[in-house]
Amino acid sequence: MIPSAYGAAEARGIWLYLEQDEGEMVSVARELLGRGRQLADSLGVPLTGLVAGKSVQHLAKEAIAHGADSVLVAEHPLLEPYTTDAHAKVVTQAVLEGKPDIFLIGATTNGRDLAGRLAVRLRTGLTADCTDLTLESGTNLLIGQVVGFGGGIVANIKCEVHRPQMATVRPGVFAAPAPDAARRGKTQALNVDLTEDELRVKVLERVMQKTADISQAKLLVVGGRGTKGDLSLLQKLADLMGGELGVTRVAVDAGWATHERQIGQTGYVTRPELAIVLGASGAQQFTVGIAEAGMVIAVNNDEDAPMFESADYCAVDDLFQFLPPLIKQLQGAGAR
Ligand SMILES: Cc1cc2nc3c(=O)[nH]c(=O)nc-3n(C[C@H](O)[C@H](O)[C@H](O)COP(=O)(O)OP(=O)(O)OC[C@H]3O[C@@H](n4cnc5c(N)ncnc54)[C@H](O)[C@@H]3O)c2cc1C
């Protein structure tokens, strides 16, 4: 077996890669700070955040308020925008010096990209796209829960020998902790040695396209097969209430909506304050994606639909009858 760059005997503490974009911490980084804090407390070890970018010093304060004990700050013009070469080099160097026992990264596009590269450079394993992180009783090894084979299995994966124990975590599965401005921690600047000729990719232009982020939505209007592909009324309700449209997998498979809107085991885990679910039967693979909703209202024309078991309020009705008067009333009430 090829040994990792350092072993378990030298490894200590939990590190988080705190992804940022143009000076703003991405939501999954705050979520990792919450879960990382809990794991660090269970193990009795420090929690360290690593933030890399052009001008990101201010994020150290935010990370500490959200639970970090210390933050390593790597600043350099070539660290913005994200490129694999620049971030992989800087993060690898920091990890080789600091030797964390556990290293967690958000499973965003950039996070996934970085994690794979780091795992190879550090010669360690990577549990990708985790939907939960726990500690194995007795050994305190990190257990990453991963949904595999299109949702057909849930695997618990550990990395026994190599270090760091690395995992990427899906956005939305952990709640971000409330910040505590009174928390105190250490900030350390990292020496960054980067030159342009080391970077094989040059970003010439960024084209921003607004995509839905249902994992952060406070209100979701969710449609299933019962919509028969007509999501216009649901979209109208979502717009009126300032929410986002979500769908079941059936709707995505049928091409009625894109995967970024799919809720459930193979879609997104969401935490809205309110989810209004229309024309969805309530399959378990779907309901795991709204299990953390503050309140669920279900509309289904079948009074025996399992969806009603996961709902706080139930309406046995045809959704095409149910929605127009509700929309009219909201329009009359002057909702947005
Ligand atoms: C491995 C695996 C992973 C999966 N992952 C996911 C996942 O991430 N997300 C997900 O959603 N699914 C997932 N599924 C699929 C899941 O098992 C269900 O098949 C799916 O959620 C059903 O979608 P649905 O409720 O829209 O459709 P259906 O189960 O067909 O339900 C349609 C519902 O609409 C009601 N209805 C019909 N017409 C009307 C009307 N006019 N008004 C009101 N109600 C009406 C019906 O009574 C019915 O209850 C997965 C399945 C597998 C095997």
Image: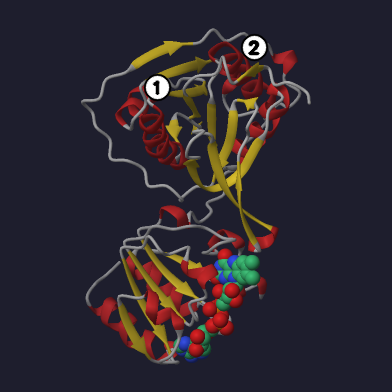
Total marks in image: 2
Residue 329 percent coordinates (x, y)? 26, 82
- The amino acid type found where label 2 is placed reads Leu
Q: Earlier in the sequence, mark 2 or mark 1?
A: 1
Whether residue 317 is situated above or below residue 42 in the rendered picture? below
Q: Is residue 289 visible?
A: yes
Residue carrying label 1 = 46
Residue at the far front in the pictured view: 138
Q: What label sits on residue 181 in the rendered view?
A: none
Looking at the rendered structure, the secondary structure element under dot 2 is loop
Mark nearer the viewer, 2 or 1: 1
Label pair 2/1, CB-CB below 8 angstroms: no
- Nearer to us in this view, 313 or 75: 313
Disc 2 under 8 Å from ligand 1? The reply is no
Image quarter (top left, top right, bottom left or bottom right) of the N terminus: top right
Quadrant of the rendered image holding ligand 1: bottom right
- Nearer to us in this view, 242 or 253: 253
Q: Residues within 10 Å of mark 1 (few under 14, many from 20)?
A: some
Residue drawn at 39 percent across, 92 percent down: 317
Residue carrying label 2 = 194
Residue 232 percent coordinates (x, y)? 49, 77
Looking at the rendered structure, the secondary structure element under dot 1 is loop
Residue drawn at 23 percent across, 28 percent down: 181
Residue 31 percent coordinates (x, y)? 41, 41
- The amino acid type found where label 1 is placed reads Pro
Q: Is residue 247 visible?
A: no
Give how far apart the Cα atoms at labels 2 and 1 are. Answer: 28 Å
Residue drawn at 27 percent across, 70 percent down: 335
Horizontal arrangement in the rendering, residue 137 relative to residue 81 (left or right): left
- Nearer to us in this view, 175 or 236: 175
